[in-house]
Image (spheres, rainbow, N blue to C red):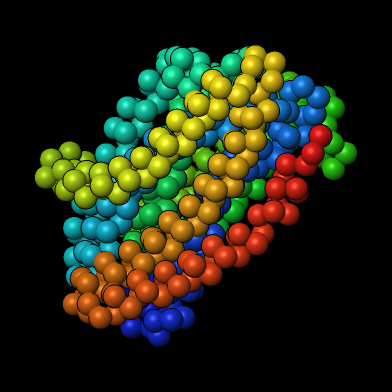
Amino acid sequence: MADPVDKILSAPLRSAVVRFGAPLALGMGLQTAFNLIDAFVISRLGGAVAGPALGAIGICDQLAALGTIVSYGLSVATATLVSRKVGEGDHEAVKELAWQSLLVIAILSLLFGIPGIFGANFVLRTLVGAKGEVANLGVPYLRVMLGGSFTIFFLMHLTSVQRALGSSKTPVGLLIGSNVLNFLLAVVLVYGPGDSPAVLSWGRPIAQLLHIPRMGLMGAAWATLIARAVALVPLIAVMVKRFGLFRRGSRMAAHKETIASIVRLGWPSSAQLVVRIMAMLVTHSLVARAFTTPTDQSATTALGIVFRLETMALFVGLGWGSAAQTFVGQNLGAHNPERAKQSGWYAALYNAGMMAALALAYDPAQIIVYPAP
């Protein structure tokens, strides 16, 4: 733990922030890449399936994002508290915060997962107003994504804690591996032994060998959940072996004061992002009710594409914010407020540059990921 902390507290600030923050921005962008991979594979189904399927995941991803945003706010609060304790050198407090925050995320997973499994039909059809094939495809997809939301909750939380401890490259490496696995699984599960684009036909013999049926949109859902779950295994192992967290003998009982401090600090961060996601869902609902019919959901499909790309930009910005948070927290804990302030300005500058690059890249990116039929 000493080496990364020393870099955050004493290395040349300009280069230290970019070396630490760039992997985090990439990692946060990769959180949304799960959905982009699904959209890429689904868009190649062709015929009358691709359009409604893209519309369904456009709505469902925003609904699932509500839980992810609430969870992320709590992860941000945990990272803030952990980075401060790391700067102070209080490693026992770090262990306590890590374990108690894990309990909070587990409870949140149940609060979103159970209602999601049983209430997906009501949410999508009644509250959002999805119609026709978008609703038919979206309900089971949403049920799986909300029921398995614990995978993204824990994935984002554990990477946030690692970042607060001063590690940014290991979580990103695991996320890249998880996205590769997601892509491989999506090709096999979505197309199965049936027709697929020539460039993706390598998945057909694998599906035939393993007797995997053509699952369409549901294959994308299961591929995402499996890939996230697999990534959690080495992520937890790193937390235990490298940082000494969650080891046997650690206090496992809930500590009300610690949990309350995490929730109290995390809720404002969650709330402002929840308001944003709710605005997007209201827009989805208005479009679904006013501009779609049971046989034409093209407006919903287009809106889902735009929102997905915009969400990636948001998460990249959150990555630079996370980098600033780590530098600020650890340097405040080490009684170096001036370095803490400067690190925030550097992170904001780098984020502005990356947003400009994304703006330039998005127009051709839409052509590549979502080609015209």
Residue 279 in percent (x, y) is at 42, 37
Query: For this rendering, which residue is in front, 280 or 25?
Result: 280
Residue 344 in percent (x, y) is at 35, 71
62 versus 330 height, above or below? above
250 versus 173 height, above or below? above
Residue 141 in percent (x, y) is at 56, 24
327 versus 143 height, above or below? below
Q: How many numbered marks does the figure carry?
A: 0
Query: For this rendering, which residue is in front, 206 or 283?
Result: 283
Residue projecting furthest to the bottom: 12
Toward which corner of the image does residue 140 lie, by quadrant?
Answer: top right
Give left or right: position of 168 versus 97.
right
Query: For this rendering, which residue is in front, 2 or 284?
Result: 284
| Image quadrant in which the N terminus is located | bottom left
Residue 40 in percent (x, y) is at 70, 40
| Image quadrant in which the C terminus is located | top right
Query: Residue placed at 39% from the left, 81% from the top?
Result: 13
Toward which corner of the image does residue 54 lie, by quadrant?
Answer: top right
Q: Can residue 219 be seen in this view?
A: no
Toward which corner of the image does residue 213 lie, by quadrant?
Answer: top right
345 versus 316 height, above or below? below
Query: Residue placed at 64% from the left, 30% from the top?
Result: 299
Residue projecting furthest to the front: 290
Query: Residue placed at 27% from the left, 39% from the top?
Result: 104
Query: Residue placed at 40% from the left, 35% from the top?
Result: 278
Q: Is residue 19 visible?
A: yes
Query: For this rendering, which residue is in front, 140 or 121?
Result: 121
Give left or right: position of 336 versus 240.
left
